[in-house]
Image (spheres, rainbow, N blue to C red):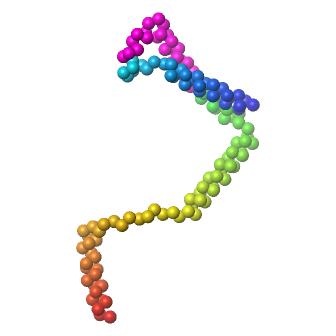
Amino acid sequence: MLYTFCIVLILIASVLIILAVLVQSPKSGMAANFGASNQVMGVRQTADFLEKFTWTMAVAILVLSLVATLAMDRDKLAQSTSSLSKDAQTLIEKTTTDETTMPQMELPATDEAAAEEPAAAETAEPAATAE
């Protein structure tokens, strides 16, 4: 019950923090040059309030997340952990059994390899003619 309540409060706080961030005027950048007229009639106090509100909501989300984690049912947590471990084991088995290899591209011969090939061919020919 407490877990569900915390999740609902986290969702509400998330929506409120999104709205508060969208309402705030930027403090720097090109848009700040055009916002000089917003300093009239208490807009400065509104900006301070919105900044404090944003920080308060961020802290509230953090605290509610910790409380929700502590309030989780141990049975659900154990079921979740066991299903995650089964999924992880299945993925590990699948990746180890699938031996899909990338096709290899032939590399062009370098000067050293080209220099060694004729020497190897010359030594192989006399052995073939000797037989």
Q: Depth check: 73 or 11 in front? A: 11
Side of 105 where 47 appears, left or right: right
Tell me where the magenta segment starts and ends, as one range.
Answer: 33-58
**Image quarter of residue 70:** top right
Residue drawn 68% across the image and 49% down it: 83
- For residue 14, above or below residue 37: below
Asked if residue 121 can be seen in this view, the reply is: yes
Residue drawn 33% across the image and 65% down it: 107
Q: Depth check: 66 or 25 in front? A: 25
Please provide percent x and percent y for residue 18: 55, 25
Q: Depth check: 105 or 89 in front? A: 105
Q: Residue 91: within the magenta?
A: no
Please provide percent x and percent y for residue 104: 41, 65
Residue drawn 30% across the image and 89% down it: 127
Side of 41 where 4 appears, left or right: right
Q: Residue 50: within the magenta?
A: yes
Quarter of the picture holding the C terminus: bottom left
Furthest residue toward top:
41
Quarter of the picture holding the N terminus: top right
Residue drawn 44% across the image and 64% down it: 103
- For residue 98, above or below residue 80: below
Q: Depth check: 60 or 43 in front? A: 43
Please provide percent x and percent y for residue 57: 58, 23
